[in-house]
Amino acid sequence: MDYDPQELEARWRERWAEEGRYEADPADAEAAVAVADDTDASDDDATGDADADSDDPTFITVPYPYPSGGMHIGHARTYTVPDVYARYRRQQGDNVLFPIAWHVTGTPIIGAVERLKKGEEDQLSVLRDTYNVAEDTLEDLETPMGYARHFIEEHYKRGMKDLGLSIDWRREFTTNDDRYSKFITWQYETLRDRGLLEKGLHPVKYCTNEEQPVTTHDLLEGEEAEFQEYTLIRFGHGDTVVPMATLRPETVRGVTNAYIDPDADYVVADVDGEEWFVSAAAVEKLQLQGHEVVPKRTVSGEHLVGERVTNPITGDEVLVLPADFVDADNATGVVMSVPAHSPDDYVALEEAKADDERMAEYGIDPAEVEEIEPIPILSIEGYGEVPAKTAVEEAGIESSTDPALEEATKELYNSEFHRGRLNDEYGEFAGEVVEDVRGRFRDAYREEGAFGTMREFSEEVVCRCGGDVVVAEQDTWFLRYNDEAWKQKAHDVVSRMEAVPENTRGEYDHTIDWLNEWPCIRNYGLGTRLPWDDEFVIEPLSDSTIYMAYYTIAHRLEEIPPEDLDREFFDALFYGADAVEDPDERALELRSEWLYWYPVTYRFSANDLISNHLTFYLFHHAELFDQPQWPEGIVIMGMGLLEGEKMSSSKGHVVLPGKAIEEYGADTVRFFLLNSAEPWQDYDWRAEQVASVRNQLERFWNRAQDVIENPGPEERPELATADRWLLSRLQRTVETVTEAMEGSETRTASQAAFYDFEEDLRWYRRRTDRSRPAARWTLREVLETRLRLLAPFVPFLTNELHERLTGTPAEDAPWPEVDEDLLDRGIEAAETQVERLVDDIQGIRQSLQNAEEDVPEADPDRIRITVAADWKRDVFATVAELGADQGAVMSEVMQDPDLRERGNAVNDLVGELVEFARGRDDGELSALAEVDEGDAYERAADFLATEFDAEIVVQREGDDAEAHKQAVPFRPAIELEAE
């Protein structure tokens, strides 16, 4: 039977759908409720476990997709990794729930629809060319939910089913559904009552195109951008304020000049009743940050070039110079220069001094520029009087284009912050370290009116709609993630849960520590309205923190009218009958299902979500649920590349799962994605390698046919050494794969079960006569076990083959366990020696064949193998007992008079054997110590004779022969003889 993955996979998909194969229902939900309701929620030892006799529930979740576009191969990996773990746990006997839903909250879908309706070419190109949307279907996409439904049904859902994901489809929902909104309403009313929601002025990311706040998930660029609070130094130009932004307000006494872009647009505006001079780009930013701004007239930056502005602290008048490096879109567009303490400014000033022609072009007397000298305002050990000059000269920087300038600037800023002490002219702040005084210095001059405040991002931020994102200060509702008690609860969750890989645990704690208030609403979009102010919508990262709990009851809530899902209903559901006066019996019934499944066993998610979604997930579970329902573990996943480059839907640089499955088959797609890297590592989809996987699976299929057609005897016959070796290796593989799967190491597990064991099989096929009854029985046993090990990875192929072999699909067979009776380290060690011997003989023959003259021994008639003398074996036994400690071994062996007489020979041998022992564990060394090398080679003599078409003579050193070369344990002397 030929391998036809498309036909085979279609049959299994149809069968799974007809059977409702992955629909998971509680085995003993009542027991879960009884235990949970009798548990003191404050008891840290509480577990809330269901009856021990019921199947263990395993609850696996993954972030629900946002269907603003189609599913690509990167998404396929995201959802296949948890599927593998879900399938593994089912084979382990667990009752597994793996659900999915659809996140439509917010504006990206609305924005996509608007671009479609406007006929924007880029949007149409993505829909037509990347996602293959037919012309007659485009009209169906012109409503937000119509758009979402298309990509849900035609891309994500179809793709997930084609991949064979073991999802319980009864539980799907969208975040725009009425019942889900009732659930989120309960969540936010509860948080508000507990004082964890608050209204007030707060800096937010604000899209100037959509004219509303946005969050990280809405961004095209700048996801990692941080808010930066600038101090505005209110320089004066007559009656006009010329504010200049800085992150180092204490350097104001060192300002020697200012810079402006002469070609950029600036405005003279009325700001809070004063006349200000700022860039045109700053007007909207200032307005959004609470200032009353009325532009009066627009001028170019050249308007201020050559003028002098007054330092509000020193009273000095400093010259404004032209500079192309000034970014008028950043802050106010006018920057102050502190050349004594900024390498950037120092180099810029030196270049300005050298450019007399440009200065004259703007009517500036070059002599005035030449007179500008750095003004030191602090001292720091390791630098001269002018630290910036020291930094520039020591780095050998000669121009502003030198890449070393940025690093020199960062290094000096950091050094001055931690070690720089302010000079005497700073009065009450003199002698203090910048780190200790910056905040007090800034605040003091704010109170005097010399300083102001403005916020900017640390990098450019762009919304998915294409609009610029700026910092705005808005009166908004925000989650109080800065609440210390709430933070401590979140830390408690982290300390109890399993973080995979373990090195991510600190990232959760770090995020919890720095996380501050989080704006949780936006002005419009899909999703849940703020319960007490329906002008606002709860934003996407805030309505997706506990939806995992909703999965457990989603399919049963369909029976209940939305209007019945009020605060008391969900209180009864999540907190029990005692939480309300008159609990709804339907809520209490649903409580049993929730408690059966909860907590989430593992959440699989992307590494970049630790800094937002995943930590929010921990915060909300910590507050809303008792400790027994806190998350048990999170597995982090890496990012995907396509042929070495980042995937991009807008550029068409993606592979759609449907196309890949059509070309290679779902099992091939799954296996490549799972075997190419561990889940938390980045992977690279490469068509050539995927095709290779397809070929290897076909080869596996064909070899399996041979076993299925001739499976050998039912009863286990007498096994040969090679059979026992292979079965022992099989037990090692079961052990390795199981351990890897417990740690979600899909690459290690699939590598061991497929590729690594193929190497063992390759040796076995070479080593033995496979027509023997014992060999047929062994190969059947091996195939059956491997099919069960590989079932989570390639479910279609393994189910088909296992059912044909045993009558049962692989996924319905229990996970293999190590059979201790088949483990034999001695046989494994002996066979390893035979493999090494073959390699050594081949190496010798190859060397002889490569000789310039013909060497008869290159094609030997006889191969003489001489194993080490018994005294050498005794020395190895000591090494095996004491390990790779040469001193300890020598001390022990020299207690033997016979060995002591051998002197340097023993010393040399110990050195060789200790080196051999390094990196080998005690078990392997013990097994080797039990191996009779001579006997192992004798048993393999017929194989060796066939392999090399030569007579094989095995002899012992110092016994019946003497080798020309001395033998060492596990490195016999080998002589090739020609007659």
Image (cartoon, helix red, strand yellow):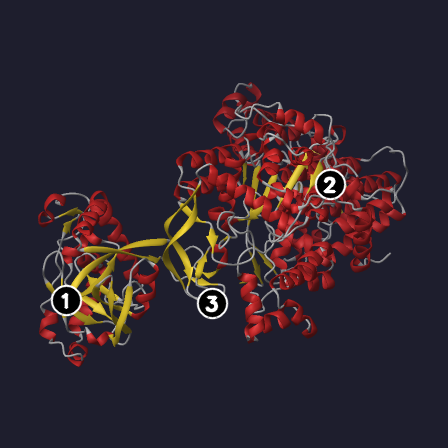
Residue at coordinates 64% horizontally, 58% vertically from top-left? 850
**Looking at this view, is 233 or 55 the one in front?**
233
Q: Which label sits on residue 854? A: none
In-image side of 84 versus 575 (left or right): right
In-image side of 675 versus 281 (left or right): right
Image position, residue 848 (x, y; %): 65, 54
Identify the image quadrant of residue 225. Answer: bottom left
In-image side of 242 versus 454 (left or right): left
Image position, residue 874 (x, y; %): 61, 25
How dense is the environment of label 2, judged by Cα within 10 Å: few (below 14), some, or many (20 and up)? many
Dot 1 or dot 3, earlier in sequence: 1
Q: Secondary structure at mark 1?
A: loop
Q: Amino acid at mark 1?
A: Asp
**Looking at this view, is 41 or 176 the one in front?**
176
Give the answer, above or below, for where 306 lies relative to 810: below
Which residue does the numbered mark 1 point to in the structure image?
239
Dot 2 or dot 3, earlier in sequence: 2
Q: Amino acid at mark 2?
A: Ala
Identify the image quadrant of residue 48. Answer: top right
Which residue does the numbered mark 3 point to in the structure image?
466
Q: CA distance from mark 1 to mark 2?
A: 74 Å
Image position, residue 800 (x, y; %): 82, 49
Q: Secondary structure at mark 2?
A: loop
Which residue does the numbered mark 2 point to in the structure image?
24
